[in-house]
Image: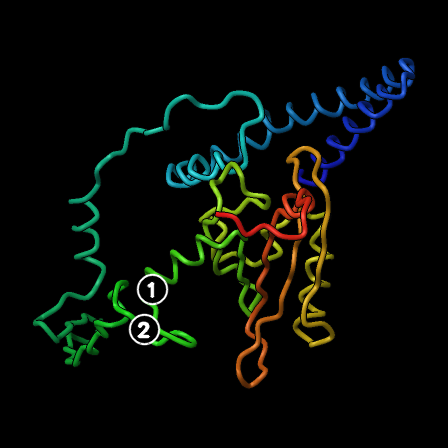
């Protein structure tokens, strides 16, 4: 359906372009074609897709959809308030079920497990947790200096770039928060984290994504650069896909950084050093 949505969007663009040429007869024909496909898609979404989703989605799934919707925008009506559904409390029931299913501790470092043959006890020594790793404000050795996890996160979020990292297994692992969600060039949401990179893109560009990763993974290229002008956003977008390799040259993933370079074209002097 994602692919068909793109086709319907193209039909609308064609009709609008024909209207600008002044050919009203052709515009009418093309708009009617667009309207027919558009109305059929709305019917399929409401009568088929939503019915299926209502059967298989949990309330938690719908809460995640609501949380991500601001990033992508709304087709018709934007909610004026946050959706807060009624939630049943099943705490005691869940605890009782867990007690009957999962092994119960016999002591601080012991676990009792029941089997058909009898009951046995496992004794273990817990691993000592690293206090340094858990403390986000404690400085760590970081490249050519020292940074805490909190400082590193702040720095990444203050760069004038949209950063995305996909690991060597093609799993979308990280993106920064350098811009408000409504100003993001490439929309990213928390629910995408952990997905295969191919599932984070529309079907029409998946082959291109796979090609980019193959070029970077095999070392045929160290980076792939693209750019395009977006009239709707008023931005000139510059995109770089960079192979990330460790000190031994082993491929660890792909770093994507995206920037609006339109302000650079508006520089009208050779220097500016005033405060």
* Mark with earlier residue (2, 1): 2
> Element at badge 2?
strand
For the point 32% across and 29% down, the residue is 84
Residue 21: x and y in percent read 89, 21
Question: Badge 2: how crowded within 10 Å, few (<14), some, or many (20+)?
Answer: some
- Above or below, 235 relative to 83: below
- Above or below, 42 relative to 121: above
Which numbered marker is on residue 34?
Answer: none
For the point 62% across and 70% down, the residue is 243
Towards the viewer: 220 or 3: 220
Q: CA distance from mark 2 to mark 1?
A: 8 Å
Towards the viewer: 251 or 85: 251
> Element at badge 1?
helix
Towards the viewer: 136 or 48: 136
Q: Would you say 133 lies left or right of 103 here? A: right
Report which residue position mark 2 lands on.
140
Snapshot quadrant of residue 262: top right
Report which residue position mark 1 lands on.
149
Snapshot quadrant of residue 28: top right
For the point 57% across and 76% down, the residue is 245
Residue 96: x and y in percent read 16, 50
* In contact (CB < 8 Å): disc 2 and disc 1: yes
Residue 70: x and y in percent read 48, 34
- The answer, for residue 65, to whether it is visible in the render is yes
Pick out the residue farthest to the bottom.
248
- Above or below, 79 relative to 183: above
């Amino acid at each position: 359906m994602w692919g068909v949505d793109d086709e319907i969007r193209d039909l609308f663009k064609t009709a609008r372009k024909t209207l600008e040429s002044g050919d009203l007869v052709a515009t009418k024909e093309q708009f009617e074609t667009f309207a027919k496909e558009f109305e059929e898609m709305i019917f399929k979404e409401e009568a088929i897709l939503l019915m299926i989703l209502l059967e298989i989605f949990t309330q938690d799934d719908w809460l995640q959809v609501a949380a991500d919707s601001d990033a992508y925008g709304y087709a018709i009506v934007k909610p004026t308030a946050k959706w807060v559904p009624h939630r049943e409390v099943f705490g005691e029931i869940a605890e009782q079920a867990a007690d009957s299913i999962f092994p119960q501790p016999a002591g601080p470092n012991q676990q009792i497990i029941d089997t058909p043959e009898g009951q046995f006890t496992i004794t273990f020594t817990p691993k000592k947790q690293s206090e340094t790793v858990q403390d986000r404000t404690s400085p760590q050795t970081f490249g050519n200096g020292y940074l805490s996890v909190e400082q590193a996160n702040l720095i990444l979020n203050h760069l004038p770039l949209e950063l995305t990292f996909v690991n060597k297994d093609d799993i979308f692992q990280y993106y920064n928060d350098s811009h408000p969600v409504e100003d993001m060039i490439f929309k990213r949401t928390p629910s995408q984290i952990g997905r295969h990179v191919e599932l984070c893109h529309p079907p029409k560009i998946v082959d291109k994504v796979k090609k980019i990763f193959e070029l970077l993974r095999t070392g045929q290229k160290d980076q792939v650069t693209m750019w395009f002008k977006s009239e709707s956003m008023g931005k000139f977008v510059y995109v770089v896909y960079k192979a990330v390799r460790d000190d031994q040259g082993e491929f660890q993933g792909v770093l994507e950084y995206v920037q609006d370079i339109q302000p650079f074209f508006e520089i009208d002097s050779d220097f500016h050093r005033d405060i």
